[in-house]
Amino acid sequence: MNNQWLAFFQGIIFVKVQGQGAERLINRLLRSGIPIWNVSKQGEQAILFSCSLQHIHKVRRAARTFEGDLHFYRGEGFPFLLKRLWRSSGFLVGAAAFLVVVLLLSNIVWRIDIGGASPKMEHQIRKELAGMGIEKGKFIFSADDPETVQHKLLNRIEGLTWVGVEVRGSTFHFRVVEKTAPKEKKVKGPRHLVAAKEAVIAKLFVKKGQAAVKRDQFVHKGQLLVSGFIGTEDRLKEVAADGEVWAETWYKAKVEMPVSTEFQVLTGRQVKKHRLEAGSFKLPVWGFKNHSFADYKKDEQLHSISFLGMKLPVSYAETTYYESKQTSRSYTEKEAELRALDIARGDLEAKLPEKAEIRGEKILQRQFTNGKVKLSIHFQVLENIAVEKPITQGDKKNARRKKHNEYPARKSE
Amino acid sequence: MAKKWGEQMRSWLTKSLNLPEDVMMDLPRITMIGQLHIYIENHRGLLAFSDKEVRLMLTKGQLLIKGQSFTIKTILPEEILIEGKIEKFVYLDG
């Protein structure tokens, strides 16, 4: 009785004894040390009792000399539960498999919607997405998060002004805004070409109009370069002046370059860890090895797992540790100067239009202080300085009075 | 003669040392809870059992318990717990 729980774990069998001398059998069981309980009489001859499953062989042995009938009619307890569970394990396996399948299917990309794009753009986006691993039938958590996808798309596809990325359940939605380049105005009004900045003219290439400057001439900002008036003074005609005026311009730049710098570089060694997270509970799934990096960078990506479109509180995290190394770089003063010059040149080139060309450079000042090289550099650049300026009514009157090449320089432009 | 003397000795010891009789003299200890349960220690076996009557062997004689709807809740080599409606129990000298 006191060990009812223990008995439950070991299993309880219900025995039915029929025949004369059932009491004697019970006495015999007692003497061989088999505890029995819940003995009751059923009818005249039959006695029911229960005993532990582990004594079933002993009960059988004791009943050998008994001339009546012994029958184990029922079992209860843990071993029998297990047996029943095993018998119905197909259902359990089926249910588990169903859940797994639904879970997997909920995390697969079923559809990619692209709205607002021309067919050509849509095709291009789909191709780019496929390259990123976002395709129908792929797992959502193998894909990047929406922000990264957006970034990559914007970087890789030209002609894309903006793209909105949203993951709703198992569908990727993309809203696309394409660049629409404004059409170039075909009709050009009459205009002059004037200087964009102070420069010395190097080369004139006039398609239309009349040149108002000569080679090696210094021009101010706003000075007339190519006039839109052609013809003689009494038969003036207005045209849209067109052409290129290449001139030498000047730029000053100041750069600083530390002689020695320290920075982190990645060595290329990395350790990946995968785990499942539910709230503060973290379950490592793969990658149990700890990294032994002294310096490292950590990159973590969280993918939430959804079930039938609902987000589960469980997410799948992928952490990558990249080993990094502290490296120092030191230059001699000469090298630092060259590097500084390179940087200044690069900066300038980035600012200049494509066709412009750096003609020469001159270091005006160099200073070595606090482990730094300070340079101020003068650059000579050859660039097209012509900008368009429409001709107004007043200009025409002036033009009639004056000669074109005496066009006054306008300071306030 | 020797047996009788031993028994007398044991009885005297029990009385003078204030020891429980059931331990010293191999007597049954019977505990009853109302009419519901009867708990007998130191029995020597089950002689007859039905839902109206239980007969137990003792060291000396028998014990007959009568009542209604008996079931043996637990039975161990020397202990028995009977549940039901107990009406009476009688010692039968063997």
Image (cartoon, rainbow, N blue to C red):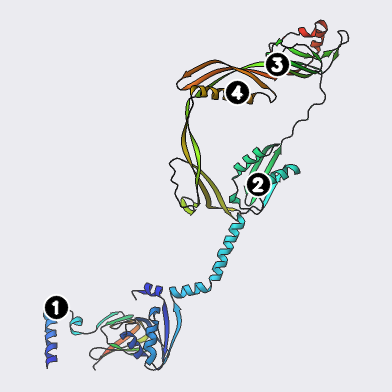
Front disc: 2 or 4: 4
Q: Is residue B53 above or below residue A173?
A: below
Residue holding disc 2? A131
Q: Chain of mark 4?
A: A
Mark earlier in primary sequence (2, 3): 2
Residue holding disc 4? A345
In 3D space, how far apart are the residues under numbered discs 3 and 4 (Cα atoms)?
A: 19 Å
Q: Is residue A296 above or below residue B11?
A: above
Q: Is residue A234 above or below residue B10?
A: above
Q: Secondary structure at mark 1?
A: loop
Mark earlier in primary sequence (2, 4): 2
In 3D space, how far apart are the residues under numbered discs 1 and 2 (Cα atoms)?
A: 97 Å
Is residue B6 visible to the viewer in this orientation of the structure?
Answer: yes
Q: Secondary structure at mark 4?
A: helix
Residue holding disc 3? A247
Asked whether the residues under the numbered discs 2 and 3 touch, taking CB atoms below 8 Å apart as contact, a structural biologist would say no
Q: Position of residue B18 (x, y in %)?
A: 14, 78
Q: Position of residue A136 (x, y in %)?
A: 67, 52
Is residue B70 visible to the viewer in this orientation of the structure?
Answer: no
| A21 or A283: nearer the viewer | A283
Mark earlier in primary sequence (3, 4): 3
In 3D space, how far apart are the residues under numbered discs 3 and 1 (Cα atoms)?
A: 132 Å
Q: Position of residue A204 (x, y in %)?
A: 76, 16
